[in-house]
Image: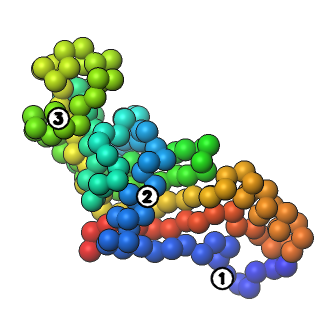
Amino acid sequence: MTLPTGERIEKDEHLAGDDAIAKVRKLLPNFRAAFFATGLSRRTHPHARPLALQGDPSVFGGTLWFFADHRSPKIHELSADPTVSLFFQNDGDSCYMQLDGSAAVVQDRPKMRELYTPTLKTWFPEGLDDPNLTLIRFDAVAGSYWESPGGVLQAMTAYAESVVTGSPGKSGRSGTLSLRD
């Protein structure tokens, strides 16, 4: 079956404000880390690296936190350009998300104590007393997501439906997110 000209295969959701924040809050527990990409607005080669998410995703209100070493290149890159994109991937749950926003280096000792876990001693042996320990605050403004509840079984069902009907199958949901009105 051919799709009428201009008809889209997937119908995206477009979520804004509280609905977008609620969607991100629902998806965040699927991810332990994000690829943190800098250098996006300077039209240079982007630089991405994985950073572990910190804190409780159930309280997400638009801000995410990351620990970093203040001597790292990402800190220098943020001082030149605070524009950041985060990329999340969980193949096991067929869940993906991308968030755009800005990031800032923050020296907030109470926030560090709140977010600190013993695992951080892997990178910061002196723990909270490590002089190189700093926080990065990321404030999301927009993004996109893709999810396939049911994973492989859902994808197989979409495949079978596609074969039988001759039209493209859809195995999940996707959408755009506008977190700031």
**Amino acid under disc 3:** Met
Q: Pointer 3 and pointer 1: residues touching (CB < 8 Å)?
A: no
State whether residue 77 appears in this view. no
The spot of residue 94 in percent (x, y) is 61, 50
The residue sitting at the right extreme is: 164
State whether residue 28 appears in this view. yes
Q: Quadrant of residue 20?
A: bottom left
Residue at x 72%, y 51% (from the top left corner): 152
The residue sitting at the bottom extreme is: 4
The N terminus: image quadrant: bottom right
> In the rendered image, which residue does mark 2 sit on?
26
Residue at x 88%, y 66% (from the top left corner): 163
| Tag nearer the camera, 1 or 2 | 2
The spot of residue 106 in percent (x, y) is 13, 40
What distance separates the C-alpha of mark 2 from that of mark 3? 24 Å
Left or right of 168? Residue 57 is left
The spot of residue 44 in percent (x, y) is 36, 44
> In the rendered image, which residue does mark 3 sit on?
112
Q: Quadrant of residue 150?
A: bottom right
Left or right of 50? Residue 140 is left
Badge 2 density bin: few <14, some 14–19, many ≥20, Cα 10 Å: few
Badge 1 density bin: few <14, some 14–19, many ≥20, Cα 10 Å: few
Give the secondary structure at mark 3.
Answer: helix
The residue sitting at the top extreme is: 125
Residue at x 32%, y 66% (from the top left corner): 179
Give the secondary structure at mark 2.
Answer: helix
Of residues 118 and 77, the one drawn nearer to the viewer in this rendering:
118
Badge 3 density bin: few <14, some 14–19, many ≥20, Cα 10 Å: some
> In the rendered image, which residue does mark 1 sit on?
6
